[in-house]
Image: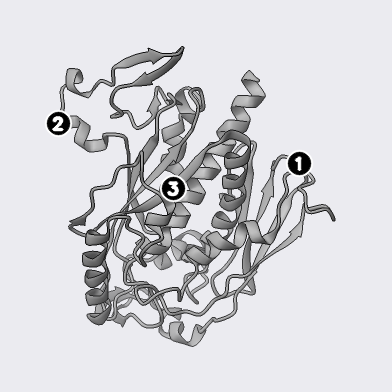
Amino acid sequence: MASSFGQLFRITTWGESHGGGVGVVIDGCPPRLKLSEADIQPDLDRRRPGQSKIVTPRKESDTVQILSGISTTGRTLGTPISLWVKNEDQRSDAYNEMKDKFRPSHADYTYFAKYGIRAWQGGGRASARETIGRVAAGAIAKKILREKFGVETLAYVKQVQKISAEINPDTVKFSEVESNIVRCPNSLAAEKMIRLIEKMRREGNTVGGIIEGIARGVPAGWGEPVFDKLEADLAKAMLSLPACKGFESGSGFAGTLLTGRDHNDAFRAKDKKVYTTTNRSGGIQGGISNGETIFFRVAFKPVATVMHEQDTVDEKFANTTLKGRGRHDPCVLPRAVPMIEAMTALVLVDHALRQRAQCG
């Protein structure tokens, strides 16, 4: 089944939003890496609900426990690492009406069409709580990339609806991303974004936008030809996230407005090191990293649950209506930032290990 991701660094997430907990099994993590819950918890804290006034108020500590794969000296054994986070604040009664009715634009109907049964409390595997396992595994991947390869992964909110921010992917810092609750490193744009999200919450509505992801320090040569191109694997990783509807790397769709002469990244060399004078390729050419900063953008739709009456059908295929209830994000973007970082790190560490295995 499709709950696993990666080749050499492989993760399998498990659990439902209103079950006993959620987690991940990581297979292929290199041995002798110093690792503890303290390496993982900060990213889970950035993802968890209830962290600010513009996200869902569900109260979850999202405290991670390492169940296997670590020695008594606190180092990875090379065996599967299992991580678990307990669900603490389920309120299934808020979903009672959804037991028989499909929420518009949610996965309720499609899961029912596929399996003939569904976890109607909170959406089950389609809930964003599934991403806890990804973020936890991603924290380990980020540590490997940072310590073994000198690679940094970072993401930030680039746009909320029509409010867009100018950000330099080569110089933006983590502290700037974390300087405000919307995780946009442009303070003026961030204030406008926060006001818009608060307005959506008051109106019982939601809003979407764009997150930009970057990776700095990636050497030339990571990625595979043809089907496992680096940007193809990044695209699959991002599009597998809840509410994600689009992916573009480098110049993306805007590159279609240029001519080839304008779009090409000229090569130069200095001290036997190749670099490009521009980076419209987004750090990837032919599906393989070229040594420049990798950057891409991910589009998220507005959260599907709105606090207004909408047309829908029930499990007997009778027309009816449904009004959203429960605790939900008016905008998924602030909490999706660590998800983007995690999926970026998972792709890159997998390709780093594949490159080392094949080419030394």
Q: Which mark is in front, 2 or 3?
A: 3
Residue 255 visible here = yes
**Residue at the spot 48% in from the left edge and 64% down from the top edge:** 47
Q: Which residue is labeled 2 in the image?
A: 257
Q: Position of residue 147 (x, y in %)?
A: 62, 40
**Residue 81 horizontal/vertical position (percent):** 72, 52
Q: CA distance from mark 2 to mark 1?
A: 48 Å
Q: Position of residue 280 (x, y in %)?
A: 28, 29
Q: Hey, what amino acid is under mark 1?
A: Pro
Marks 3, 1: nearer the viewer: 3
For residue 213, what is the image quadrant? top left
Q: Say whether marks 2 and 3 touch (CB < 8 Å).
A: no
Residue found at x 58% / y 52%: 139
Residue with the mark numbered 1: 31
Q: Is 330 drawn above or below residue 339 in the view shown?
A: below
According to the image, label 3 marks what residue?
154
* Mark before the other along the chain sequence, 3 or 1: 1
Three-letter amino acid code of the residue under disc 3: Leu
| Measured Cα–Cα span from mark 3 to mark 1 | 25 Å
Q: As rendered, which of 76 and 299 lies closer to the eye?
A: 76
Q: Secondary structure at mark 2?
A: helix
Please state which of residues 248 and 46 is positioned toward the viewer in this rendering: 46
